[in-house]
């Protein structure tokens, strides 16, 4: 069963997701891509759409697909049997308990364990999906994770347009180009407050470099 | 023999010249980088490489027949409309309207593929243009309503309606008596004639402008465009159009000259009108799809004006 899921996952991304992302949506790199060649690594990105994960996975070559694990909320994605099979085996999420739910498992330790085994985690520091094409305040999860794994490089990536293509709370897919901006990888610095501010300013710079309209009023 | 130039279709003959010209351009740019090592020719090289790819795709589509050509232009319309919607301000409340706007593309190209001229010519300017504001009224949001209607209409006009005329050119001779009137060509030839002249006109205006351009012609919209560039380009295009008319079209030399001058002027207007949109929004290129050229709209802008005008001149006088 494990190998069937493996193949299904590969086929899902090679045959459906990559073509949809590259042809129907269309990616436009605003600068030269800066991406990890292998694990462990963390991709952090803004979160406006379910498509964010799909695009981030599509950015990486298929040959390291087996290492990629998007970090996602267990309570949202493991709601029913089909969805949880799909989320765990096809998307390949690392399910974490959101704070306050179950204190016995520490989500940061779960991520750290995956990183120790050489995984590439996809992490959305904003937590859940924000309003279309707007960034909400970053949560401290990314700082805690960086503090726990100070040697792992963190790649900030900013995506523009997916909140237009498939915003939160809407199931209709309307294609817009997705503009992607890459940034040099970061690693944890001694001070957690500084690191938080650095991540924030990195995202502000990335956001400012995209000179395209957000939703009109 | 495979390379028997005399017996080739005129389209193929002209294409050979085009490939030869591009090869010369490639060689010149290669020599330039060898001679002048200090200067950076990356953009020029990117441009020429992109020309190879664009001409390759276009040539392959023409070779594979009208249906493939129609599909190619449907795809180009889709990418162009997506580029347009990605750079202009659109309202969240209009997402469903934008979805309908995309749906006009398969329909419009379906009318073309089936040769339904009556529907092809009114579908966008009548049905789509009436349906879009109706669908927006259903959404109930009046803030920026007029701007949103205008935005979507102009997007459909530029990227679907005008560009689809290129595809219909391939279908033209199937109606009327064109084939029996002259032995000199087919729809693919008309399409090649128009696309080639429009694109060469862009290059010629750029080159003339670089060589001797001094008087800006539209300083507030496109500061690099000059009167000298425009005149040089239009005359060059006119002469080329005159030479190629007999080979690719049912026109005689002086008609070709007039049409060529028209293509030169209309191409300039199409170029400047897209520049005005970009300047309004505050961006330089419409995208980065084609290395060295910008987005797909940056490459097709002149054709948005030359295509419908050329199409109707041909249709009125020759079919």
Image (cartoon, coloured by chain):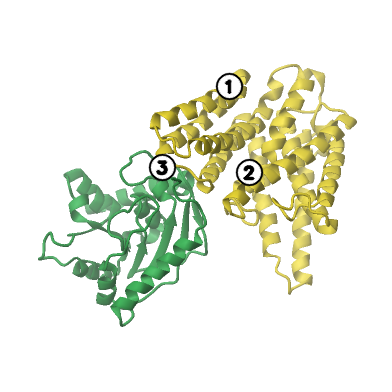
Chain colours: A green, B yellow
Q: Which residue is tagged 3? A: B92
**What residue sits 79% from the left and 41% below the top?**
B264
Whether residue A35 is visible: no
Q: Residue furthest bottom?
A: A190
Q: Position of residue B312 (x, y in %)?
A: 73, 26
Figure quadrant of the N terminus of chain B: top right
The mark found on residue B57 in the picture is 2
Residue B92 lies left or right of residue A114; in this view the side is: right
Disc 2 or disc 1, which is closer to the eye? Answer: 1
Whether residue B137 is visible: yes
**Chain letter of disc 1 in the image:** B
Label 2 – label 1 distance at C-alpha: 23 Å
Pick the residue in front: A93 or B120: B120
Q: Position of residue B11 (x, y in %)?
A: 75, 35
Choose the circle earlier in sequence order: 2 or 1: 2
**Quarter of the image where one finds residue B55:** top right
Choose the circle earlier in sequence order: 2 or 3: 2
Tell me the SS state at disc 2. helix
Label 3 – label 1 distance at C-alpha: 35 Å
**Chain letter of disc 3 in the image:** B
Q: Position of residue B248 (x, y in %)?
A: 79, 32
Choose the circle earlier in sequence order: 3 or 1: 3
Pick the residue in front: B88 or B187: B88
Residue A160 lies left or right of residue B40; in this view the side is: left
**Chain letter of disc 2 in the image:** B
Disc 3 or disc 1, which is closer to the eye? Answer: 3
Label 2 – label 3 distance at C-alpha: 36 Å
Tell me the SS state at disc 3. helix
Q: Residues within 10 Å of mark 2 (few under 14, many from 20)?
A: some
Q: Residues within 10 Å of mark 3 (few under 14, many from 20)?
A: some
Total marks drawn?
Answer: 3
Q: Which residue is tagged 1? A: B114
């Amino acid at each position: 069963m494990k190998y069937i899921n493996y193949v299904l996952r590969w086929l899902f991304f090679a045959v459906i997701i990559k073509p949809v992302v590259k042809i129907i949506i269309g990616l436009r790199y605003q600068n030269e891509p800066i991406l990890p060649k292998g694990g462990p690594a963390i991709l952090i990105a803004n979160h406006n759409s379910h498509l964010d994960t799909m695009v981030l996975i599509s950015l990486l070559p298929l040959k390291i697909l087996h290492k990629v694990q998007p970090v996602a909320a267990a309570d949202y994605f493991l709601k029913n049997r089909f969805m949880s099979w799909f989320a765990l085996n096809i998307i390949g999420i690392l399910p974490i308990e959101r704070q306050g739910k179950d204190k016995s498992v520490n989500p940061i330790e779960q991520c750290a364990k995956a990183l120790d085994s050489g995984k590439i985690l996809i992490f959305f520091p904003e937590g859940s999906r924000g309003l279309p094409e707007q960034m909400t305040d970053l949560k401290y999860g990314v700082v805690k994770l960086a503090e726990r794994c100070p040697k792992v490089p963190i790649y900030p990536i900013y995506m523009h347009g997916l909140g237009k293509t498939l915003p939160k709370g809407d199931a209709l897919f309307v294609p817009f180009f997705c503009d992607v901006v890459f940034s040099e990888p970061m690693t944890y610095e001694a001070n957690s407050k500084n690191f938080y501010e650095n991540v924030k300013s990195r995202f502000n710079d990335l956001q400012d470099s995209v000179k395209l309209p957000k939703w009109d009023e | 023999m495979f390379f028997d130039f005399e017996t080739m279709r005129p389209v193929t003959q002209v294409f050979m010249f085009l490939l030869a010209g591009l090869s010369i351009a490639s060689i010149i740019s290669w020599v330039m980088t060898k001679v002048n090592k200090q200067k950076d020719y990356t953009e020029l090289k990117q441009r020429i490489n992109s020309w190879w790819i664009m001409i390759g795709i276009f040539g392959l589509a023409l070779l594979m027949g009208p249906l493939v050509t129609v599909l190619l232009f449907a795809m180009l319309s889709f990418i162009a409309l997506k580029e347009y919607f990605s750079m202009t301000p659109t309202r969240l409340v209009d997402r469903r309207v934008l979805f309908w706007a995309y749906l006009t593309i398969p329909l419009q190209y379906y009318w073309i593929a089936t040769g339904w001229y009556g529907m092809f010519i009114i579908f966008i300017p009548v049905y789509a243009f009436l349906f879009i504001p109706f669908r927006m009224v259903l959404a109930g949001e009046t803030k920026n309503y007029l701007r949103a209607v205008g935005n979507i209409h102009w997007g459909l006009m530029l990227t679907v309606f005008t560009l689809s005329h290129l595809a219909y050119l391939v279908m033209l001779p199937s109606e009327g008596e064109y084939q029996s009137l002259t032995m000199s060509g087919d729809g693919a030839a008309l399409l090649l004639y128009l696309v080639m002249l429009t694109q060469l006109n862009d290059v010629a205006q750029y080159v003339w402008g670089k060589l001797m351009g001094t008087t800006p012609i539209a300083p507030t919209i496109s500061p690099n465009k000059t009167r000298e560039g425009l005149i040089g380009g239009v005359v060059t295009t006119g002469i080329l159009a005159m030479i190629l008319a007999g080979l690719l079209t049912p026109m005689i030399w002086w008609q070709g000259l007039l049409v060529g001058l028209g293509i030169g002027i209309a191409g300039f207007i199409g170029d400047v009108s897209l520049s005005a949109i970009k300047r309004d929004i505050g961006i330089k290129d419409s995208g980065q799809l084609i290395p060295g050229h910008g987005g797909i709209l940056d490459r097709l802008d002149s054709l948005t004006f030359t295509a419908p005008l050329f199409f109707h001149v041909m249709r009125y006088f020759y079919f």
